[in-house]
Amino acid sequence: MLKAYLNKDIKIIKVSGDDAKDYLNNIITNNIEQTNTENSIYSCLLAPQGKFLADFFVTNFEDGYFLLVHSKFLENLIKGLNFYKLRSKIIIEDISHLYKYCFIPNPEIDTIFETNISNLGCTVIHNSSYAFIDPRIANLGVHIVTKDNSIGKSELELVESDCLEHFLSHGLLSMYLIEDLSKFYPLENNLHMLNAVDFKKGCYVGQELTARMKLRNKIPRTILPFILDLKNDESHIKNEVLENNKVVGEIIFQKDEYLFGHITFRKLSKDISFDTQFSLKDQKLKINQQDWLNF
């Protein structure tokens, strides 16, 4: 029996119909052509001005596309999907009540996939359930959508948890944890490094500004994962982040020793590297160095 972590905050939207594929490809940031019964993707829905509305995983399952989205963004996603629908032949349904979503951090892949394949997004379907390797970064874990508490030959022992510390330890600040998203463009939370944006696919909602930021290297700010040099119980939310004795940003999220700072590039004395020295007023900050971070 496999222990899997049930997260009831993850909702499941199904998009189906004759125009579902083309419709989704015209509005989301990633390329729906990469989604099939053997591969899942991570993507976003943006406002026309390029601001973030929702992020989600997409899998081609049964007779449509399943979108896994955090409950915080459920309304944004459904509203956005319906807004651009017009005369498209699609059906948009919230089917969260029919399935359970769970996550297994760093499992033995062959117990689920019956193979050692570990490609990002690799997907396997077993009757009324499916599983896919996280398409953002390597060795993060496997997402499962199930009706009967099983995947393939494996029964699942479901334990409620959002696995938050697991994701934070890998330098991931999920978008639902950010308090005021109106300030953020998707590239500021490194979503282009997490395989959420396809810069070659052509038009989608918010594409013009997003592509221009990337092409001209004009991303104004970034969210950096930090680890406290000395762990303590003090809250550092909204504390100033310093570099070369100059304020370059502020802490926007903290849990235990994991902190995330919103950093303004133009205020830095030099380009960011893993050797860049950051600090709070009273102690040093270390960048939570991850292979996927690409400065």
Image (cartoon, helix red, strand yellow):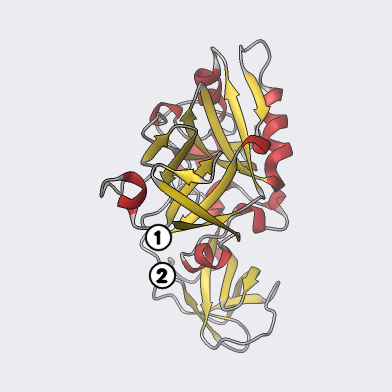
Task: Judge whether 54 appears above or below 205 on screen.
Answer: below
Q: Is residue 295 visible?
A: no
Q: Residue at x 49, y 69 (%)?
A: 169
Viewer-closest of 157 and 28? 157
Q: Name, please, the residue furthest toward the left.
A: 116
Viewer-closest of 28 and 274? 28
Task: Judge whether 57 appears above or below 246 on screen.
Answer: above
Task: Please name which of the two marks, 2 or 1, marks the residue nearer to the observer.
Answer: 1
Does residue 154 appear to the left or right of 67 in the view shown?
left
Badge 1 marks a residue whose secondary structure is loop
Q: Which mark is residue 273?
A: none
**Residue 114 x/y as whole percent:** 29, 45
| The C terminus: image quadrant | bottom left
Q: Is residue 31 visible?
A: yes
Viewer-closest of 207 and 257? 257
Q: Residue at x 66, y 38 (%)?
A: 96
Badge 2 marks a residue whose secondary structure is loop
Q: Residue flagged by tag 2: what amino acid is it?
A: Gln
Q: Which residue is mark 1?
A: 106
Q: Residue at x 41, y 26 (%)?
A: 33
Q: CA distance from mark 2 to mark 1?
A: 19 Å
**Residue 202 x/y as whole percent:** 45, 26
Q: Which residue is mark 2?
A: 289
Q: Residue at x 60, y 47 (%)?
A: 185
Viewer-closest of 215 and 134? 134
Task: Judge whether 184 appears above or below 204 on screen.
Answer: below
**Residue 106 x/y as whole percent:** 40, 60
